[in-house]
Image: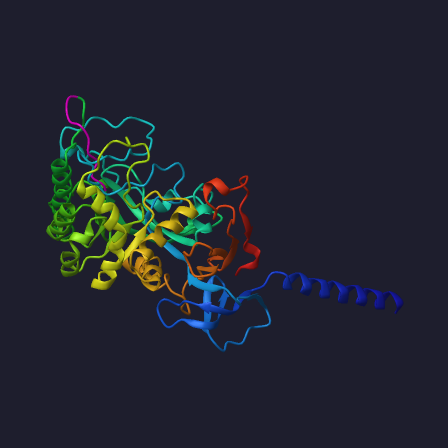
């Protein structure tokens, strides 16, 4: 009996310890008494958001907090949906800088360099050689959670990105990704979300490959869509009558293009906007226009077209290494002044738009870029919507991202102060219900930063 009593006591103690250990890893997270900006509905001045299993389980005012929840006191904090970069290369290691829409520079538009390739691309003599076409390449297969820019993006409150490959004219199939995960596959939310098109321009002449001019780029894009239509028709005819007919040749490039739910067309100048609105309608496919710095000249045309647009956060400015004696022309000066006001004009006109980073990759600069648009006239609510629900809806992901609603993915950012104010700091970031500690050092201006630190991740606090 004595030994039996001891064994029973040991079992009781072990069971108690097991329960205590389980309690250290909560199955739910409750953010209590915070100012909740739902985006899709009314703000909650003092609300509660309950997260479980990577999803938003409840959001409201009088929510009972379950006993198994880890509770965060949200007093004095504001909760937003996680911010979404509507067009970037975030998550793709060693990617080239994000390709921008061609900007007016007084000469030929600059051409972003494609990502490094292991072998030089053979010279193409015409569209039949399919030059600079990577329509089949998938961002979903390229992303990696250890990519160097992700921590800075999280420090700015970004949890999600519409990420695209970055080489060629047809760049490949983009994916909506979360900026965290154990493996690349863990990051993918939706794929494919579109095909970005970039016009790669440069000097012509001996040794240059087709196409090099803007006219050549546009003609080439048009030709591939004509080829795609013919390819689809040939497959339909063969599928209906395979007997006695030669099967169509499999085309890797056209298969990738056919899988694209939408295309992204570059347009920064007013004339480019006119051209791409017309070109997109000619191609008869869903399309989005990106760039938009001179859209203040085309607000009515964009409203009439009913096409969603992406606005670059890389506001035009005089190059830092420019000759001080060089005089900028009036159009350049006007664009530098007016471009930050474009988001407010689009919001007022009812044009659906979202922001994209366009190579602005550090937290402090991202914050300043959005603040510049707010100072130029867009309301904070519309700016937040452009960084959340609008971006999700443009890519067909509004049913799972972009707002704080029951059943959506638990991507949240919590700030001390209103988002994008100078003294505001990002205190918490949740991605798929797991909490990440945003780097305070990365939120500072580069000159004020300390030594680089390893990212602090407390994913064990999040949902299982």
Residue occupying image coordinates x 29% and y 34%: 114
Residue 145: x and y in percent read: 45, 45
Residue 205 on the magenta segment: yes
Residue reaching furthest to the right: 2
- Please say if 125 is above or below 154: above
- Quadrant the N terminus occupies: bottom right
Relative image position of residue 341 (x, y in whole percent): 26, 54
- Residue 150 in magenta stretch: no
Which of the two residues, 413 or 239, is positioned nearer the viewer here? 413
Q: Is residue 143 left or right of residue 224?
A: right
Regarding residue 262, the answer to whether it shows in the image is: yes
Q: Position of residue 448 (x, y in %)?
A: 50, 42
Which residue is found at the position 23% from the left and 59% from the top?
346
Q: Main secondary structure of the magenta part?
A: loop
Q: How is the image coloured?
A: rainbow
- What is the tally of numbered marks visible in this picture? 0
Residue at the bottom extreme, as displayed? 62
Vertical arrangement, residue 408 with respect to residue 158, above or below: below
Left or right position of 173 against 214: right
Up/down of 322 relative to 63, above or below: above
Q: Position of residue 372 (x, y in %)?
A: 33, 52
> Image quarter for residue 249?
top left
**Residue 267 in view (yes/no):** no
Residue nearest the observer in this picture, 129 or 358: 358
Q: Nearer the viewer, residue 187 or 47?
A: 47
Please give the range of residues in magenta: 198-206
Which sits in the foreground, 16 or 82? 82
Q: Residue furthest top?
A: 206
């Amino acid at each position: 009996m004595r030994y039996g009593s001891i064994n029973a006591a040991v079992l009781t103690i072990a069971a108690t310890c097991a329960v205590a250990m389980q309690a250290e890893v909560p199955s739910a997270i409750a953010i209590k008494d915070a100012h909740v900006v739902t985006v899709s509905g009314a703000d909650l001045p003092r609300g509660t958001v309950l997260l479980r299993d990577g999803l938003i389980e409840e959001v409201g005012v009088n929510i009972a907090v379950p006993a198994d929840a880890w509770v965060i006191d949200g007093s004095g904090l504001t909760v937003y949906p996680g911010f979404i970069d509507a067009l970037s290369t975030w998550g793709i290691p060693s990617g080239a800088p994000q390709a921008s829409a061609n900007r007016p520079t007084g000469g030929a538009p600059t051409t972003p360099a494609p990502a490094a390739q292991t072998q030089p691309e053979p010279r193409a003599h015409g569209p039949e050689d399919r030059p600079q076409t990577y329509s089949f390449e998938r961002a979903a297969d390229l992303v990696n959670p250890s990519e160097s820019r992700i921590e800075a993006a999280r420090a700015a409150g970004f949890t999600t990105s519409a990420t695209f490959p970055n080489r060629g004219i047809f760049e490949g199939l983009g994916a909506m990704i979360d900026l965290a995960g154990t493996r690349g596959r863990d990051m993918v939310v939706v794929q494919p979300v579109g095909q970005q098109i970039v016009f790669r321009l440069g000097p012509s002449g001996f040794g240059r490959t087709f196409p090099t001019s803007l006219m050549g780029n546009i003609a080439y894009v048009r030709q591939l869509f004509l080829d795609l239509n013919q390819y689809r028709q040939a497959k339909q005819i063969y599928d209906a009558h395979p007997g006695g007919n030669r099967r169509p040749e499999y085309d890797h490039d056209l298969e990738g293009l056919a899988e694209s739910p939408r295309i992204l067309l570059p347009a920064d100048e007013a004339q480019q906007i006119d051209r791409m609105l017309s070109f997109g309608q000619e191609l008869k496919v869903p399309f989005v226009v990106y760039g938009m710095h001179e859209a203040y000249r085309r607000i009515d045309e964009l409203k009439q077209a009913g096409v969603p647009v992406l606005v670059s956060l890389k506001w035009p400015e005089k190059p830092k290494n420019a000759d001080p004696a060089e005089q900028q022309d009036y159009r350049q000066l006007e664009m530098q002044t007016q471009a930050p006001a474009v988001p407010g004009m689009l919001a007022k006109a009812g044009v659906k738009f979202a922001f994209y980073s366009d190579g602005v990759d550090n937290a402090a600069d991202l914050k300043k870029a959005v603040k510049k648009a707010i100072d130029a006239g867009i309301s904070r609510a519309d700016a937040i919507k452009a960084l959340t629900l609008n971006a999700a809806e443009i890519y067909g992901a509004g049913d799972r991202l972009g707002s704080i609603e029951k059943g959506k993915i638990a991507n949240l950012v919590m700030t001390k102060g209103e988002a994008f104010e100078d003294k505001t700091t990002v205190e918490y970031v949740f991605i798929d219900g797991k909490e990440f500690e945003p780097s305070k050092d990365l939120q500072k201006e580069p000159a004020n930063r300390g030594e680089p630190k390893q990212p602090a991740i407390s994913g064990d606090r999040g949902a299982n």
